[in-house]
Image (cartoon, helix red, strand yellow):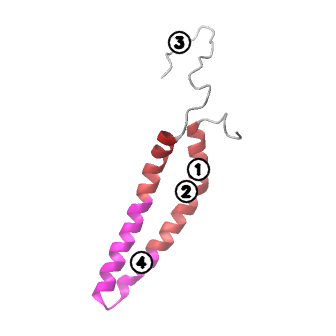
Amino acid sequence: MRFAAIATTALLLILIATTGTALLTTSLVLATSFFIFVTAHFYALVYFGILAGFATIVAFLADVLTAPALMVLASPRSPGANRRIPSSGAARVPPP
């Protein structure tokens, strides 16, 4: 595998740097589009615009906050994750 040697946290940082920008831009454009309904004279559209705009923002926050945790939980452990690396004089830490 291409990313086999890269740690999960490094992959998450790469994911946030690449996908996070697109997710933020899309969410802001969509929320702004819904918030434009606030200028309508029909109250049902005003309430719909407020509700849908805030729902889009909450969905973005949920994606940003839960996606990394779910990816760490769903990622398989690498084959050498439990293998101990010999150290010279450093304190030995038991594997997790």
Q: Mark 3 points at which residue?
A: 92
Q: Name the residue under label 4.
A: 34
Give the vertical position of 33 relative to 42 (above or below): above
Q: In the structure shown, which secondary structural element does the residue marked by tag 1 occupy?
A: helix
Disc 1 residue type (three-letter): Leu
Q: Distance between the residues labelled 3 and 2?
A: 37 Å
For marks 3 and 4 on the same chain, the one whose residue lies earlier in the sequence: 4
For marks 2 and 1 on the same chain, the one whose residue lies earlier in the sequence: 1
Disc 4 residue type (three-letter): Phe
User: Residue 18 occupies which quadrant of the picture?
Assistant: bottom right
Q: Distance between the residues labelled 2 and 4?
A: 21 Å
* In-image side of 52 versus 83 (left or right): left
* In-image side of 56 versus 19 (left or right): left
Residue closer to the observer: 91 or 80: 80
Check contact, mark 2 vs mark 1: CB within 8 A.
yes
For marks 3 and 2 on the same chain, the one whose residue lies earlier in the sequence: 2
Magenta stretch, residue numbers: 32-60
Q: Residue 15 carries which label?
A: 1
Q: In the structure shown, which secondary structural element does the residue marked by tag 4 occupy?
A: helix
Disc 2 residue type (three-letter): Gly
Q: How far apart are marks 1 and 3 (CA)?
A: 32 Å
